Amino acid sequence: MMELYQGIDMVQVSKFRDVFRKHTNFASDIFTEKEREYCETRKDPHIHFAGRFAVKEAALKALGIGMSGSGIDHAFQEIETIPGASGKPLLGFSGWVEKISRKRGIRQITVSISHSGDYAVASVILVKENNV
């Protein structure tokens, strides 16, 4: 038997741009080096940063953690979205987030990111396989 857990999040890109202007260390505090490298090579990096931020929040929601709790301090750096060979986003966990994922029996992770107008949205689906 399988169990599915889903998280979704939407980010307004214009507000995200403002955060970047006001907080110069925001990108390095929240995004991994690979994520920053990817986004910074794009025509409009903020759209891609916003999408990856939405992924991080959606992943935390899918895990049932949200934005609070012990260990959350470094969680954003422990959730990484990178492009696969086909360009499809791939999601990986490390550190505390990976430990929570393993503890919950997560065996598969699926992520989708979309951008439209001033919004970026992400959906994360986690699959738990129960041994019958």
Image: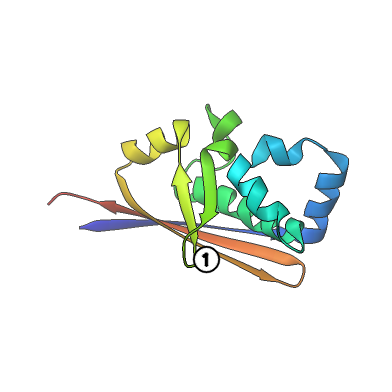
> In the picture, residue 51 is in which quadrant?
bottom right
Residue 41 place in picture, x, y as percent = 70, 56
| Residue at far top of view | 70
Residue 132 in percent (x, y) is at 12, 52
Is there any visible trace of residue 49 in the rendered image? no
Residue 131: % across, % down: 15, 49
Q: Is residue 67 left or right of residue 110?
A: right
Where in the figure is residue 40, as x and y percent of width and height? 72, 52
Q: Residue at x 50, y 49 (%)?
A: 59
Whether residue 28 is visible here, answered yes or no, is: yes
Name the image colouring: rainbow
Looking at the image, is 112 positioned above or below residue 95? below
Residue ranking furthest to the left:
132
| Disc 1 packing (10 Å; few <14; some 14–19; many ≥20) | few
Total residue callouts? 1
Quarter in which the N terminus is drawn? bottom left
Q: Secondary structure at mark 1?
A: loop
Question: Who's the residue at 66% across and 39% down the image?
Answer: 30
Please name the residue shown 52% across and 28% down the image.
Answer: 71
| Residue positioned 47% across, 67% down in the render | 86
Closest to the observer, 88 or 77: 88
Which residue lies under the disc numbered 1? 87
Pick whichever, 1 or 102, lies toward us. Answer: 102
Q: Amino acid at mark 1?
A: Gly
User: Of all residues shown, which one is farthest toward the bottom?
Assistant: 116
In the picture provided, is 40 more to the left or to the right than 127? right
Q: Give the side of residue 30 with respect to residue 43, left or right.
A: left
* Vertical arrangement, residue 56 with respect to residue 48, above or below: above
